[in-house]
């Protein structure tokens, strides 16, 4: 006797139950998003579809759910992530762009608009290109440059820029070392630098981040402020006097980052909160050498 095939709705509900029982965060979202991407339909449809899954689709969905049970992020399973208006492909050298970083982009766009004219933007540690590509897409009059220490990350970023129809100049550089831009020409510096010290990883990071994101993009060594210090020390030759600086920060870091910047000639301008209400971006202005 033939057994009845599992419907789309049943498969999604069963997957959510298994994920929930295993303690995986947001089990319903994971099960629904993976099915929606598998079938190429809106997420809202998967819980009302009664048609049976084909054996091929069922096998692929089961493989994806098994990976999620091991705490592999949905974006790693799919190989891409959505960020603002962008679809960004990932590889082993790129962070998953997260909604928290949208507050950094918003702050950068705000500073661009306050200038009232096209400007040169530099994104340090671009990874998948999320910040740089979003700025280039939403403010196409700007000249956008981006650096990363990883050639593989830059390969992904270049692909993402092309697929999203944006013009960004990517540079292989250790922060700004080796970057060939004219001195004193950058109007806006933006960065989501590594800001987790290796000793705090277990406490600060979920397994989805700690075990699946590239360490070089996460960890700042034993000093969580190491990359902020480097930014304040190494970037001033590239900045125009009065250049804006927008930096993503970790939880509880904003005051110390402001202090470090102020001690090196950067004027604190304020902060921006993410969707959860946490301070996620700090804004400063380069006042020139004292």
Image (cartoon, rainbow, N blue to C red):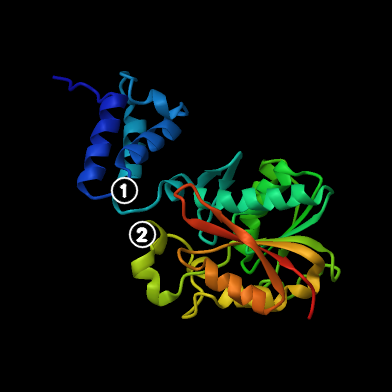
Residue name at image x 35 percent, y 60 percent: 207
- Quadrant in the picture for residue 230: bottom right
Total numbered badges shown on the rendered structure:
2
Residue name at image x 71 percent, y 42 percent: 138
The answer to whether residue 20 of the structure is visible from this angle is yes
* 139, above or below 170, in the image: above
Nearer-the-camera pick, 136 or 118? 118
* 223, above or below 258, in the image: below
Residue name at image x 46 percent, y 47 percent: 75
Residue 280 position, x and y percent, is 53, 57
The answer to whether residue 98 of the structure is visible from this angle is no
Instruction: Quadrant for the N terminus, please.
Output: top left
Q: Which of marks 2 and 1 is nearer the N terminus?
A: 1
Residue 144 position, x and y percent, is 76, 54
Nearer-the-camera pick, 288 or 159? 288
Q: Mark 1 points at which residue?
A: 25
Q: Name the residue under label 2.
A: 206
Residue 120 position, x and y percent, is 80, 57
Residue 4 position, x and y percent, is 20, 21
- Quadrant in the picture for residue 26: top left
Q: For the residue carrying disc 2, how many other residues have a C-alpha within 10 Å: few (<14), some (14-19), or many (20+)?
A: few
Give how far apart the Cα atoms at labels 2 and 1 are: 10 Å
Q: For the residue carrying disc 1, how many other residues have a C-alpha within 10 Å: few (<14), some (14-19), or many (20+)?
A: some
Q: Do the residues labelled 2 and 1 touch (CB within 8 Å)?
A: yes
Tag 1's secondary structure?
loop
Instruction: Quadrant for the C terminus, please.
Output: bottom right
Tag 2's secondary structure?
loop
């Amino acid at each position: 006797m033939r057994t009845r095939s599992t419907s789309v709705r049943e498969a999604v509900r069963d997957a959510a139950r298994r994920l929930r029982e295993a303690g995986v965060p947001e089990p319903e979202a994971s099960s629904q998003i993976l099915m929606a991407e598998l079938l190429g339909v809106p997420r809202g449809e998967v819980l009302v579809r009664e048609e049976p899954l084909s054996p091929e689709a069922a096998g692929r969905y089961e493989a994806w759910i098994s990976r999620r049970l091991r705490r592999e992020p949905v974006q790693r399973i799919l190989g891409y992530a959505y960020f603002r208006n962008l679809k960004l492909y990932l590889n082993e050298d790129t962070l998953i762009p997260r909604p928290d970083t949208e507050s950094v982009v918003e702050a950068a766009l705000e500073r661009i608009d306050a200038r009232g004219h096209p400007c040169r933007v530099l994104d340090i540690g671009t990874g998948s290109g999320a910040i740089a590509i979003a700025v280039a897409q939403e403010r196409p009059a700007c000249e956008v440059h981006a650096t990363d220490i990883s050639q593989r990350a830059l390969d992904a970023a270049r692909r993402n820029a092309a697929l999203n129809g944006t013009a960004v100049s990517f540079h292989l550089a250790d922060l700004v070392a080796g970057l060939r831009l004219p001195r004193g020409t950058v109007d806006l510096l933006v960065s989501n630098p590594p800001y987790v010290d290796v000793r705090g990883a277990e406490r600060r990071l979920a397994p989805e981040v700690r075990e699946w994101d590239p360490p070089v993009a996460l960890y700042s060594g034993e000093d969580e402020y190491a990359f902020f210090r480097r930014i304040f020390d190494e970037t001033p030759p590239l900045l125009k006097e009065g250049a804006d600086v927008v930096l993503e920060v970790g939880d509880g870091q904003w005051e110390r980052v402001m202090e470090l910047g102020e001690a090196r000639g950067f004027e604190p301008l304020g902060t921006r909160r993410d969707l959860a209400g946490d301070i996620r971006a700090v804004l400063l202005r380069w006042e020139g050498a004292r």
